[in-house]
Structure formats: C-alpha cells, structure tokens
Image (cartoon, rainbow, N blue to C red):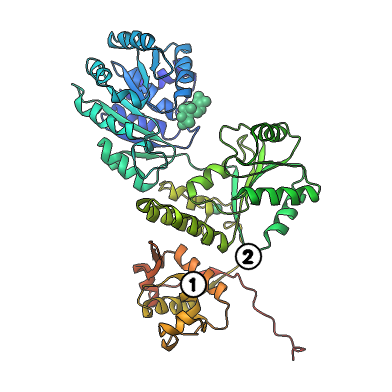
Amino acid sequence: MFEKALPLLESHFGYSSFRTGQEQAIRSVLSGENTITVMPTGGGKSICYQIPALVLSGTTIVISPLISLMKDQVDALIQVGIPATFINSSLSYSEANKRMHEAIQGNYKLLYIAPERLESREFMEDLYSMDIPLVAVDEAHCISQWGHDFRPSYRHIQQLINSLPQRPMVLALTATATPKVREDICDLLDINEENTIITGFERENLSFTVIKGQDRDKYLKDYLKKNEKEAGIIYAATRKNVDQIYEKLLKANIKAARYHAGMGDVERNREQERFLEDKATVMVATSAFGMGIDKSNIRYVVHYQQPKNMESYYQEAGRAGRDGLKSECILLHSSQDVQIQRFLIDQSSDRSRMTQELAKLQQMVDYCHTENCLQEFILKYFGETETEPCGRCGNCLDTRTSIDVTKEAQMVMSCVIRMGQRFGKTITAQVLTGSKNKKVTEMGFDRLPTYGIMKDRSSKDVSDFIEFLISQELIAIEQGQFPTLFVSPKGKDILLGKEQVHRRETVQVKQVSKDDP
Ligand code: ADP
Ligand code: ZN
C-alpha cells in the first residue's frame, strides 16, 4: 500500500519527498501496526496521518485538543481537494449534527474532533456506525498523567477504539514525550513499543553552550556588546529577575524590551511589538514570553537561570534560528538556582508528581555538568538513539585537555558508601573536605577514613565534582524529600579499578612562584 503514498504526497501537497520519520510512520501504519510518532513542532506530523487517510478506505478520525488549529487544518485540506471537516464546541448544535450526518454517509476522508466529544454517548454511537480505518491521536501526551498537559477526556479514546465494530489502527503523535510518557501512551493505546518513531529533534543551525562558574552579569554584558546588532532573548526565572536585568541593560545603553506576567496587557503588547519590529534588539522575559511568537531572526537565546526541565529548555532555546541561520543557545548555570528550583518543587502540594519533577530537574542539572556533546544529550533525552556528537556545541569545541580523575572519583564514591548511601550531596562534600559542621560530627562522620581526604579543595568544588560524577552516571540519586546519593553499577567498576574517569581541566593549577613567602 505504501506505493500509493508518494504520488499522493506529490499530487495533493506538492512535496517531492517525505521527511525523515514521515515515511517510517506511514509505512508502519499502512502495514497495520499501531504506531507512535514523536517529532518536534513543525516536523511534519500531520502528513503522517493525512496520507494514510487518503490511502485507506473510510474516514480517519483525528483527535486534537487544539480547537483553533482544527479549522485551519481542515481549510488547508479542502483547498488541496481532500474532503475533511471538524466537529467541536465552536459549532452550533445543528451545524455539528449536519456534519455528523454527512460523516456517517462517508463523505469525508478526515474528521477532526475535540476529545470532549467522546464524552457524549450519542456521539460515540454515531461513530460506531462509521467506517473508521484509523484513529490519529494528536498531542498524545495529553493521555498520560505524567505528561505536562493531562486531559481526562483523552481516556475515552481507549473506549472508542475498543468498541468500534472494526478495530481501527491507532497513530499517536506528540512533540514532547519523555520515555515514561511514551510508555504510558503505548500502554493505554495498545501500541507495541517497537513501533516508536522518533526523529527530527536536531536543529543543525543551533549551537548549545553551558557557562559555569562565571559572573553572570559580566558575561551577559560582554556577550550583548559583542552581539549588539543581533536580536535575542534572555530568559530569567522571575519577574524580579527580569526587571533587574532589564534595568541593567538600559543603563549599559542596550536596546532592551521586557515581558512578564506582572505587566499590564497594553505594556506587554507594546514591548512585544518593539521586539518584533526590531526597535528593541534584546527581549528580557520570563517563560511567559514566546508562545506563538513568530520571529525568525532570533540569533541567540540566553537563559540567565536554568529552567525546571529539559522540555522547557529546548522549547525556549529552540526559538533561536527559525530562519535556519546559525544561532546560539547559552545557559548560565549556578548551583544556587538548583536549590531554589528544588525548594519550589518541594513546596508543590502534589506529592505524586514531586519525585518525577525532581528527577526531571536532575536531568537538567546533568545537562549543565556533562562534558559530552550537548546536542546529543538533548536528542537522547527525547529518545533518539542514533546520535552523533554535533561538532558545534560548547563541549564539542572545548579544547581543554582531559585529565584522569579516577582517584578523586574513587574517594568520593567510597565516602558515599561509607556514609551508608543515605545522604545528599552537600553533606557528602562536607565530609570529604573535613568540615566541622555540627551534623557531620553528630553523625560521627568525622571518624570515617574518608573524612577530610579532599580538604585541599573547597566544598563547592567537591559539590561540582559530585555533580559531574552524577552526570556521568557513576553516582545516582534517589529522589524524595531528601535526595540521597548512591553508587551505580558503573560507579562500582570505577571503584574496582576496572575503568577510568576523565574530566576536562576546570581548575587552574596554582602556580607556585619562587617569590611566594
Ligand atoms: P507539526 O504538526 O509536526 O507541527 P506540520 O504537520 O504542521 O508540523 O508541518 C509543518 C510544516 O512542514 C508544514 O508547513 C508542512 O506543509 C511542511 N511539511 C510537512 N511535510 C513535508 C514534506 N514532506 N516536505 C516538505 N514540507 C513538508
Ligand atoms: Zn556537540
């Protein structure tokens, strides 16, 4: 059946080839497999069900929560000669009825519906009398409680699939799904996990960099001076941060605009316009800014603080370089911010989500501490398996030499084990640096053989080193109210001397001068 796909793509949509992922998804569906496709926004998900809808006989149902986009999609299909319609709450009762009547007659190749429709028994029964070869579930993460946008009405999709007289094929589509959410989608929609197609998360014109251990304000000012003529966004965590950075930039004569939820509509719109029309080159904003903003010439996105997870980070950073030209995504990391994020998550009342959010935060921290390719880290996070170093990120371009830190790694891990693998990073660093902190002595950790074995270093340094070992998966974290460290199987191999650990030189070795007293 796939032979029919390409001619249909050409004749209806005018494209000469499928994008990566589209062909796999269409082949999978047409060979009768339930399938899940994960592609970034703009990757071309719609084609993945529109082409099968044309190949298969009957009416494909498309379930989507995005009511405003339905009409556009349907209009576009009608324009290229594909009979399609939508039914959602924007229609009058009689109009919806009329469309449904036509759908039952088999007059459409595609019928778009909002998930809430499935709560109506009458509507479900109408669907049972139709010939439905395929159910496409757009924004499929909405079906999972672990997703960021759970919608209870999505749970009715299972009921629909199970009670249609002819069991339809299912194609789930989403732009954001962590492995856990994907697993959930597969479970709930009866998709074999082997039929997971993930592609296209790489943005070849973006280069990622993490800046650690520098004065952020100074870095920012220097960076903006160097890129004075280019448009860019600076994301900060709070309204207060935005205001502070904005004031500083104005003082430095940088043409900045600002945007956050604490401002009035009029002012916010004005600031946004100034940025869109290039009257202001830099937009300083909270994460409230950016949704639906279409500005293609953004040359850089700087995060003054790290966001709470990789999904948010990639979405915000991804606003750079929409025009395909080289652009930079820079994250200014400070371990203090992590403490604040952790605190905010701790405060959230929903206990069941807490562990998951802490784990996501930890992956964000790992991103800051990895010495491997940053683009690859992101692709792996989103589930791509066949990845290669990008050759253009801060880590790929880092020319510092790697040094053997196996011995230090062993010191840290043996300390973690001697402390019973029941404690967190801060106190572990204190024990290693020989701190006289009350908790350390009360617990008797000052009598451990590993007490003070790294006392020539600051506890901040050792903390960073522990983060590095976590990012290398030698030490793992058990999340909970008090996150605790334990040594992973990979870490145990290091302890046994089976493998070595290397780290790029980060601390300048202090030059001992002869003049020193
Ligand atoms: P998504 O739903 O993943 O955000 P869309 O389905 O809206 O993405 O597609 C994004 C854009 O890519 C659209 O403008 C679409 O016309 C275009 N597109 C999709 N598939 C192809 C293709 N095979 N060749 C060229 N352009 C394509
Ligand atoms: Zn890289």
What secondary structure is marked by label 1? helix
Q: Which circle marks residue 22 in the picture?
A: none
- Under 8 Å from ligand 2: the CB of mark 1? no
* Image height of 483 relative to 437, above or below: above
Q: The disc labelled 2 sits on which kind of residue?
A: Gly
Q: Residue 197: x, y in percent?
A: 37, 38
Q: Earlier in the sequence, mark 1 or mark 2?
A: 2
* Image height of 243 relative to 49, above or below: below
Nearest to the observer: residue 268 or residue 388? 268
Q: Residue 189: x, y in percent?
A: 27, 35
Q: Residue 151: x, y in percent?
A: 36, 35
Q: Measure the alpha-carbon separation of dots 1 and 2.
A: 18 Å
Q: Is residue 193 visible?
A: yes
Q: Residue at x 57, y 79 (%)?
A: 457
Dot 1 alpha-carbon crowd within 10 angstroms: few under 14, some 14 to 19, many 20 or more:
few
> Would you name the residue on which mark 1 appears?
426
Left or right side of 467 for 236:
right
Q: Residue at x 70, y 51 (%)?
A: 245
Q: The disc labelled 1 sits on which kind of residue?
A: Thr
